[in-house]
Image (cartoon, rainbow, N blue to C red):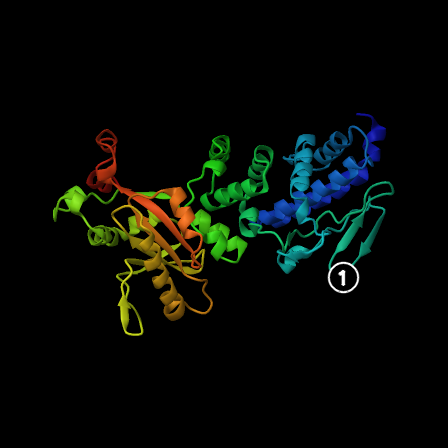
Amino acid sequence: MKEKTLITYKPAAETIKTAILQGQYEAAKGVNRIQLTVYFGIGKYISLNTRKGAWGTGALEAISQIIRKELPGLKGFSATNLKNMRLFYEAWMMLDANSSAMTDELQPSEYQLLTNSSAVADESTTKNSTVAFVEKGDYEIDIYQPLHIPETKSFPVDDFFRVPFTHHLMIIEKEKTIDGRYYYIHRTAEENLQKRTLEKLIANDVYRHQDTIPSNFTQTISQETLARKAVMMFKDSYLLDFINVEQIGEREAIDVDERVVEQEIVQNIKQFIMTFGHDFTFVGNQYHLEVYGVEHFPDLLFFNRELNALVVVELKTGDFKTSYLGQLMGYLSILDAKVKKPHENPSIGIVLCKEANREYVEFVIRDYNKPMGVATYKTTTDVPEELRKTFPDIEELKKLL
């Protein structure tokens, strides 16, 4: 590469190098959000100068070569990865701190912007930051700027900063819709997905075929972020494989009622919670509610930390009926009036039944003003004999564990 080209982009390389060093210092403390902030800032710096024509052909190769020479052993800053940082910035340009209607999501200590090296022509100090200006002809930005989240967007802030940069790139490249990206960001953060697993989910287009519960959450939960969390929290079907009504012995399997299933769940409550979802705490079964002298006993009551809400589950062994929603509405009204704490979100109700027509449920549930959903479940008895034979014996499994 010509020496003249290297000299031309020396100041730009110094600016990015300083951002790298500061970011490494912060990232060493285990803060993934700092790395993303640095990459976002570098991506913006590169985007402005390459897209607007300030830099010529070969700029990123030259910058990368200078950085590798001055920071030997540093990985992740090839010309290709610098382009990836530009892609990252341009995909999430709405997080640009210069955009309007922003609210800060970083801690005060994360506001500190990079001071630049002697290769930089000038520096200008503002109230909250030191903004580095590169030599004349380049676009002037604060490369280590705080990321802001638009108040008008239902943006998954915590999840976003928990997702590694390489995963972000895969999501950006393979999923083009904003809601789809939100979905895969949440799944990655919530389940600590490996790249290969994430790639498989996207390849299978899980976002468009996800088994979300038919509900009215988006209509009844005013906070968009909370509504999205509720939708993602529950599935439309559960396999309660720890319930085998053939072994209960009290009656024929076809005659087993809700109380029998409830008792099996209570006796295996840890397994049920692990099946049901994350961050659930069991409050009680046949929980006593009373209003105006009338008593009610909902089947199962939980509290979910992620949703900060009580979750009541009503068990039904038959097909879904609209009367179940009316019953659940009554429970939710009493819970919100008599049990819910002031700092908690409105209670959520789930009907857990054997069969339900999804389209029918979505049609009839839309006019109820309490957040409710309808899910189905299967027990070991419902699984075909051929498949049941492949299940490990529970007692043998316990011995192995």
Please give the name of the residue rendered at 29% of the width and 60% of the height, measured from the top-left corner.
Answer: 298
Q: Is residue 152 left or right of residue 329?
A: right
Please give the name of the residue rendered at 67% of the width and 30% of the height, measured from the top-left corner.
Answer: 80
Please give the name of the residue rendered at 53% of the width and 53% of the height, measured from the top-left corner.
Answer: 225
Q: Is residue 247 left or right of residue 101?
A: left
In this rendering, does residue 214 appear at all?
A: no
Give the labeled residue for mark 1: 127
In this rendering, does residue 140 appear at all?
A: yes
8 lies above or below 369: above
Location of residue 373 in the rendering, given as x and y in whole percent from the top left corner: 39, 51
| Mark 1 secondary-structure assignment | loop
Location of residue 97 in the rendering, given as x and y in whole percent from the top left corner: 70, 52
Residue farthest bottom in this picture: 292
| Quadrant (top left/top right/bottom left/bottom right) for the C terminus | top left
Location of residue 197 in the rendering, given as x and y in whole percent from the top left corner: 46, 34
Q: Compare residues 258 and 51 and report the one nearer the observer.
A: 258
| Quadrant (top left/top right/bottom left/bottom right) for the N terminus | top right
Mark count: 1
What amino acid is labelled 1 in the image?
A: Lys
Q: Compare residues 327 and 380 and report the one nearer the observer.
A: 327
Please give the name of the residue rendered at 35% of the width and 63% of the height, measured from the top-left corner.
Answer: 330
Location of residue 27 in the rendering, given as x and y in whole percent from the top left corner: 60, 47
Q: Is residue 12 left or right of residue 360?
A: right
